[in-house]
Image (tube, coloured by chain):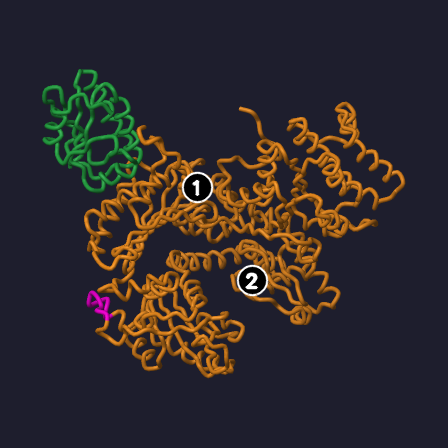
């Protein structure tokens, strides 16, 4: 199980580790963290789902809200998605709007090279 | 907030179920094209009045093009008094709707005052009716008085072009003889309704009006007691809001005993509150029940509504109950028997039977009478008979009643989740239509052996051969032929084999069902074989097929004896597989193709309303899915879909903090999950439409159903009485796939 919403800062990017179950409560916590990092001036946020087993539809709606909020101010990418979570994001059409990487390292590398990708 | 009350109704928080019925009638009332009129039939206090008044309220406030008119019959009235009351109600409600003035509906108004209002409002069209009414009264022309009142709706509709929807409550009351001279209310009323000039719904707890041929073409809508889940949800909510301790299983038992009757259930909760009692165990429920039904509010309500005219009616009722009245398979008693038993003349008998039918307690047709009341009324009648006629002491009767009820309750508790096997077997038989099913599904010994060995290789055994089923044309049970016989009734199904309707291909399937938590034993088998031999004499056909279905299988001795006699044998797992194969031909093919037949298992989980309660369901399905052989990804998909179904069920639970009921059925080739709440509805799949443009971000809400559909192989939303149920299905081998099971 992932450690609850720990994060790792690297330059202007930050990796946020999502919880095991993303519902309304955990989704809102993620949202608060992302808001705080944007406030601090981070340009890219990698949300790492490698410790996430389940994302429910309310969690999905909060993630859509996070992406909407960051739009124009920075970039957000996902990493470490389990197959079922990728499928969930695909069904709701999120994968058309966001880059998804196998792991956080790839996400950091890519996000470093794609500065300014706005959503 | 605006007071939307018109006629008195119970608080919304205490009104459960009936969404489908109300929606259906509203759709008819407001349809552009005329829909068939409705006869709403239901036993006493099942909520007919509430349904009609809620429809009236909805039409009054939300549908501008139809004038709703509600009239409740109030017992025997002189035709003139009835006409005045009816006319007043029509005018009041018509005016209230036009002026958007609900007080006119709520308040009692004299005809004089109403006339002044009509005059002030220049409502001369309506005023005409009151003037004609007075004139006809003055000339003592009762027929003209009646026709003026009953014809008012038709005339107003013609004059204004605005449709009226008429709701007649307790229409059966209009049949009561008033003892007053003059024209017959029911004949004039029937004529007005059958004119076809306005739509209506008529409600009654007796079928006399309908069966008397007084209503022309109407559709019958039944309002039975609330279903088990809605009843439990209702009682739980009432208990919770009044701080009465309860156990869900006891509420479920109470719901069953009270037949889902909302008035009885509310009375029980109210009695518990008044007496500082609870509904936590069987004994407290049985004591509360006997207090309420023999001496409490329910007794009072029954006493005042039954209107029994004398001991002969009470005796007759008791005899009907004794003939099996309180059971579902109630039987009619011939008038001849009753006349002889109670020494009644033809005329006395006919009067008593008609009077019981008018009260909704009996059905009287072709000279025979059948109990038509509910089980609670049957208990009350038994109490009255035993104490008033037979002279037993009230305490003596209550002690023996409590003793029997406790025993019955324990049996009912043990069998709560059961009781459907006979229905399932009957349904399976009725769906026999010349299909071919694997023989192993009718051979319990071979099936059990296969299951124990972990699977069955097709082609390995002769049991993989098919059994050709006949085409069943009808079925019934043997009870009429076996009066006094012990053991459950045998289902007799008639049909033809080989698709040929001739004497040579006629066949009868005799099916015994044992639906108790113990295997079929040699005693059961001997009983069936003996009875089968006797029953055989009733059929012309020589081809008899015997089938024994036992919930918990068969003892070795029973299996051997049945096999020796060539009797088909199935347990509940086999029966489920048979039903699935009959419903879906591809299921049968998949079963044959599958490399093993897994036994079917069922699990039930009840989720409380608490944070992350859905994770309990997730944990359960993870265990079940792993044991069935689903791969990690499939299990992940099932978990995610189940979470969505649970969230949806909690969100739409009618009860604050209501529970969600889950049933997992692990079948041979699929996992089926039923998710049900005590609520009104789930989000409909259609609610999730309206995706944003390609470049926009996806919409935020309403993804639940789409996720379920995307992650599962089948998702169904089944409407059930009082709510809805989501059914999720995941196949071990997907439909249409030739291989590639994840397992």
Q: Are marks 1 and 2 on the same chain?
A: yes
Residue B681: give its label: 1
The location of residue B149, given as percent across then percent down, is 77, 40
Chain letter, orange? B
For residue A109, what is the image quadrant? top left
Chain letter, green? A
Left or right of residue B170, residue B257 in this image: left
**Protein chain holding label 2:** B
The location of residue B303, given as percent across then percent down, is 62, 50
> Which one is earlier in the sequence, the residue at label 1 or at label 2?
2
Looking at the figure, which quarter contains the C terminus of chain B? bottom left
The location of residue A58, given as percent across then percent down, is 31, 33
In the image, residue A91 sits, relative to residue A45, either above or below, namely below
Q: Which residue is mark 2?
A: B325
**Protein chain holding label 1:** B
For residue A64, what is the image quadrant? top left
* Highlighted range, magenta: B449-458
In the image, residue B274 sits, relative to residue B500, either above or below, namely above
Left or right of residue B401, residue B699 in this image: left
Could you tell me which secondary element the residue under label 1 belongs to? loop
């Amino acid at each position: 199980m992932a450690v609850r919403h720990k994060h790792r800062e690297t330059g202007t990017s930050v990796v946020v580790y999502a919880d095991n179950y993303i519902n309304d409560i955990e989704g809102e916590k993620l949202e608060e963290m992302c808001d705080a990092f944007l406030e601090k001036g981070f340009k890219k946020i990698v949300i790492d789902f490698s410790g996430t087993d389940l994302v429910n539809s309310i969690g999905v709606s909060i993630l859509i809200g996070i992406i909407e909020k960051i739009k124009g101010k920075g970039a957000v990418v996902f990493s470490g998605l389990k197959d079922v979570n990728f499928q969930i994001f695909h069904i709701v059409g999120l994968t058309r709007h966001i880059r998804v990487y196998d792991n956080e390292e790839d996400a950091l590398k890519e996000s470093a090279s794609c500065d300014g990708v706005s959503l | 907030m605006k007071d939307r009350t018109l006629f008195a109704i119970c608080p919304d928080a205490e009104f459960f179920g009936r969404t489908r019925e109300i929606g259906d009638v509203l759709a008819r009332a407001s349809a552009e094209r005329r829909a068939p009129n409705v006869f709403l039939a239901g036993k006493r206090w099942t909520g007919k009045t509430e349904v009609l008044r809620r429809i009236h309220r909805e039409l009054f406030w939300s549908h501008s093009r139809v004038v709703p008119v509600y009239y409740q019959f109030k017992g025997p009235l002189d035709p003139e008094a009835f006409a005045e009351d009816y006319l007043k109600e029509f005018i009041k409600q018509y005016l209230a709707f036009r002026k958007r003035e609900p007080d006119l509906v709520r308040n009692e108004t004299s005809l004089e005052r109403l006339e002044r209002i009509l005059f002030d409002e220049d409502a001369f069209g309506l005023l005409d009716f009151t003037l004609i009414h007075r004139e006809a009264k003055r000339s003592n022309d009762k027929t003209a008085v009646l026709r003026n009142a009953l014809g008012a709706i038709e005339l107003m509709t013609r004059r204004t072009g605005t449709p009226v929807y008429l709701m007649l409550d307790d229409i059966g009351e209009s049949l009561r003889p008033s003892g007053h001279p003059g024209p017959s209310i029911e004949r004039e009323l029937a004529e007005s309704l059958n004119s076809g000039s306005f739509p209506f719904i008529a409600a009654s707890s007796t079928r006399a009006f309908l069966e008397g041929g007084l209503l022309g073409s109407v559709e019958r809508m039944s309002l039975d007691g609330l279903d088990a889940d809605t009843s439990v949800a209702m009682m739980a909510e009432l208990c919770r809001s009044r701080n009465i301790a309860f156990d869900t299983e006891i509420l479920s038992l109470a719901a069953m005993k009270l037949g889902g009757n909302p008035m009885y259930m509310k009375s029980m909760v109210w009695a518990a509150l008044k007496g500082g009692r609870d509904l936590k165990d069987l004994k407290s429920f049985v004591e509360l029940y006997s207090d309420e039904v023999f001496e409490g509010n329910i007794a009072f309500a029954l006493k005042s509504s039954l209107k029994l005219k004398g001991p002969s009616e009470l005796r007759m009722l008791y005899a009907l109950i004794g003939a099996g009245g309180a059971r579902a398979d109630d039987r009619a008693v011939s008038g001849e028997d009753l006349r002889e038993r109670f020494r009644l003349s033809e005329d006395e008998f006919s009067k008593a039977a008609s009077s019981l039918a008018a009260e909704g307690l009996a059905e009287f047709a072709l000279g025979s009478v059948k109990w038509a009341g509910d089980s609670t009324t049957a208990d009350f009648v038994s109490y009255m008979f035993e104490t008033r006629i037979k002279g037993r002491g009230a305490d003596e009767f209550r002690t023996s009643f409590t003793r029997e009820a406790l025993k019955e309750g324990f049996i009912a508790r043990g069998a709560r989740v059961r009781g459907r096997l006979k229905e399932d077997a009957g349904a399976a038989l009725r769906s026999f239509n010349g299909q071919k099913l694997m023989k192993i599904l009718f051979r319990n010994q071979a099936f059990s052996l296969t299951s124990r060995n972990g699977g069955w290789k097709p082609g390995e055994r002769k049991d993989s051969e098919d059994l050709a089923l006949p085409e069943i044309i009808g079925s019934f049970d043997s009870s009429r032929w076996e009066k006094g016989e012990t053991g459950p009734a045998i289902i007799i199904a008639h049909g033809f084999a080989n698709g040929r309707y001739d004497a040579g291909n006629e066949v009868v399937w005799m099916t015994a069902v044992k639906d108790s938590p113990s295997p079929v034993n040699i005693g059961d088998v001997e009983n069936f074989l003996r009875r089968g031999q006797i029953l055989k004499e009733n059929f012309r056909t020589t081809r008899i097929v015997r089938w024994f279905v036992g919930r918990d299988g068969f003892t070795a001795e029973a299996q051997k004896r049945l096999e020796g006699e060539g009797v088909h044998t199935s347990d509940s797992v086999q029966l489920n597989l048979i039903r699935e194969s009959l419903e879906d031909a591809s299921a049968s093919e998949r079963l044959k193709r599958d490399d093993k037949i897994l036994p079917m298992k069922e699990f039930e989980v009840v989720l409380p309303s608490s944070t992350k309660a859905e994770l309990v369901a997730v944990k359960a399905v993870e265990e079940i899915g792993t044991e069935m052989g689903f791969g990690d990804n499939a299990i992940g998909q099932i978990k995610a879909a189940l979470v969505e179904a649970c969230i949806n069920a909690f969100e739409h639970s009618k009860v604050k903090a209501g529970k969600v009921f889950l049933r997992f059925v692990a079948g041979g080739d699929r996992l089926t999950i039923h998710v049900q709440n005590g609520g009104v509805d789930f989000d409909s799949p259609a609610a999730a439409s309206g995706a944003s443009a390609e470049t926009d971000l996806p919409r935020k809400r309403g993804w639940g159903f789409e996720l379920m559909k995307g992650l599962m192989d089948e998702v169904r939303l089944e409407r059930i009485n009082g709510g809805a149920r989501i059914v999720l299905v995941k196949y071990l081998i997907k439909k249409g796939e030739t291989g590639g099971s994840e397992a």
